[in-house]
Amino acid sequence: MQTKINIKSSLRQVLAKRNINQTGLAKLMDCSPSNIAQIGNGSSLRTIQAICDVLEIKASEFIALGEG
């Protein structure tokens, strides 16, 4: 059985826990808010890892937030 992972859901949850919005994350990652808005539409593992590094969360924890 395959588990679906919703990266956008993971991102929303971790940002909410840290009281950061997408614009704030974009500033931390030195990219545009529109780039952040596109996360989840075929995001690479490199992008996901970069988000996890900036937000100081393990990739496994980030992914687990979007499982379901």
Image: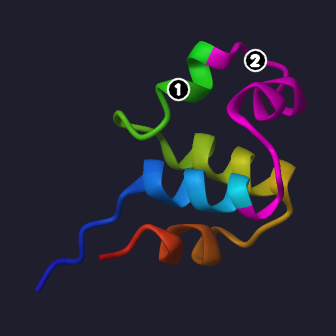
Residue 37 in magenta stretch: no
Q: Nearer the viewer, mark 2 or mark 1?
A: 1
Residue 58 % position (x, y): 72, 72
**Which region is colored magenta?**
17-33
Residue 22 falls left or right of residue 10: right
Mark number displayed over residue 37: 1
The C terminus sits in image quarter? bottom left
Please state which amino acid type lies under the numbered disc 2. Cys
Residue at point 43% right, 67% down? 66
Work out how far the residue at label 2 is from the one at label 1, CA to CA, in angstroms: 11 Å
Residue at point 75% right, 64% down? 17
Question: Which residue is labeled 2 in the image?
Answer: 31
Residue 21 falls left or right of residue 62: right
Task: State how many labels appear.
Answer: 2
Q: Earlier in the sequence, mark 2 or mark 1?
A: 2
Residue at point 71% right, 47% down? 51
Q: Secondary structure at mark 1?
A: helix
Q: Farthest residue toward the bottom?
A: 1
